[in-house]
Image: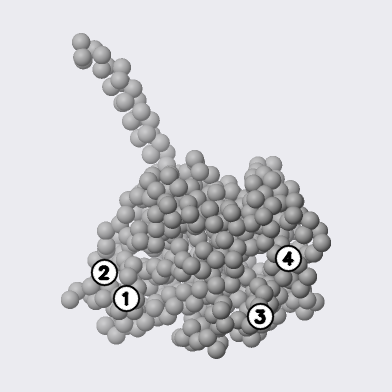
Amino acid sequence: MKVEQEIKQFMNDLGVDLVGIAGPGRFDGPPSLDPTYVLESARSIISYAIPLDAQAAYDYLSKKSAIPHNIDQIRKMQRSMHVGLKLSRFLEGKGYKAGTIGCNIRYRRDPDIFSTNPRFSHRYGAYVTGIAAPGISGNAVTEKYGAFVVLNTVFTDAILESDPILDPRHFFDGRCQECMACRASCPPKMYEADEEEYALINGELYPRGKKRSIDLCNVACFGLHALSSTKKWSSWGKTWQPDWVGKEPLPEGNNLRMTLIKAFLSVKDLANRVQPLFDTYSKPWKEGFFEDKKNFPDYEDLPGETEGRKLRAYADNLEKICGFHIDDPIGMTCATCFMVCGQNPEESINRYSMLSQGGIVAYAPGNELVILDNYEDAVAQRAKYQYKNRAIVKLEFWWLQIRNTFKYIGFDVHTLKYKNKYKQRLIEAMADELSKEKQMKNKKKNEKRNAPREAA
């Protein structure tokens, strides 16, 4: 049996059925597609996807509860890392060097603290190994599960045979155009539905919807603006940006970065809320720790008859695990663009319907959850009661915020070395593609003009 077959059989035995391989010659692209950044001797990668729980997504989108999905996400992230470690040891047993990394939640150092340049892009890895292609939202979409998966990558110095890839526009020109649930599900509409931008990978332009501003995504995904532009539904975030209520914020003429900074500093439990994600998504804990219900109970096993009491019980449990104080344990408040993307457009539109008909999140005394069906009631409830944070959480917020700032701010030599060269090649490729499109249009015009003469 060839080593590529052995790898896939090994992964299948671990319960992972979506696995792809890319060997030498598949890594010509952005700096974050360079496997040698992670493993200096890397020649090949193995990319794989683990599906998330659909029922937990339904509960999340319909506003029944955000806890099951947050639990599932942590468990699947941990599982993906342990699968990577096992495959690495399997390859090492065959005499190869191998390694893996955590999920993309820790980024390369950059002078812009809000930049999101991963050590290695698992999405790009999924493209070059053939298990996914880009969707309108920029998420990696798979045939079997849509975008609602956890991606990870193993790096090795083994010279492996590459799998066939999907066409860069495989989903973009088909199912994405008849769906668009991802864009509809983004509260500030971070990307355009009818304009494209590209990544240049192995000489091919990989499309996605053009980003209006990455800061819109940062504001939404950190729960800093949760209200939809229709004012009919929200994500699980507690905060609304007053100037954005009832409309799509326009990046032009608006200081989005200042809005983002002010929002970050005004929500006094933000760092405490998202830190468990950093701690559990970026490094493997002891295998089985989060599956053990004594350590990490299922939603049904959390004490409390109300959602607010279950949220408090979940927060207490995370406090024991992570070692700092937490009031709101729902670190994952948005990410709806990837959650609504199911295995087909019908499923995706159904998920968006759950979101758009699920109401608006507000709170009552004791931080009890209240879901309201209309905007006016939500405004009135927010005026009566705003989510309360303990003093210890507000104090720890500043320490965590400062610590995380110094982890990410700075310069990355690899990025500086390759980023400008890549950008220039991308510009040239886009200009070449535009020239080809013009030539094709002119050819069609000429054919149409000459058709009557030929017929005569």
Residue 317 sits in quarter: bottom right
Disc 1 target residue: 11
Q: Is residue 208 left or right of residue 383?
A: left
Answer with mark 2 or mark 3, whichever residue precedes in sequence. 2
Q: Which residue is farthest top? A: 456
Is label 4 or label 2 in front? 4
Q: Residue at x 70, y 80 (%)?
A: 325
Disc marking residue 374: none
In the visual, does 166 lie left or right of 335?
A: left
How many angstroms separate mark 3 from mark 1 (CA)? 39 Å
Q: Amino acid at mark 3?
A: Gly
> Measured along the vertical axis of the image, is residue 85 above or below residue 328?
below
Q: Disc 1 marks which amino acid? A: Met
Tag 2 residue = 160
Give residue 334's position: percent from left, percent from top. Answer: 59, 61
Name the element at disc 3.
Answer: loop
User: How many residues crowd mark 1 within 10 Å: few (<14), some (14–19), many (20+)?
Assistant: some
Q: Residue at x 63, y 63 (%)?
A: 236
Residue named by callout 3: 304
Q: CA distance from mark 2 to mark 3?
A: 52 Å
> Along the polypeptide, which appears first: circle 4 or circle 2?
2
Disc 4 residue type? Tyr
Quick check: marks 2 and 3 in contact, CB under 8 Å?
A: no
**Circle 2: element type:** loop
The residue identified by callout 4 is 363
Where 198 falls versus 8 (above or below)? above
Q: Earlier in the sequence, mark 3 or mark 1?
A: 1
Name the front one of labels 3 and 1: 3
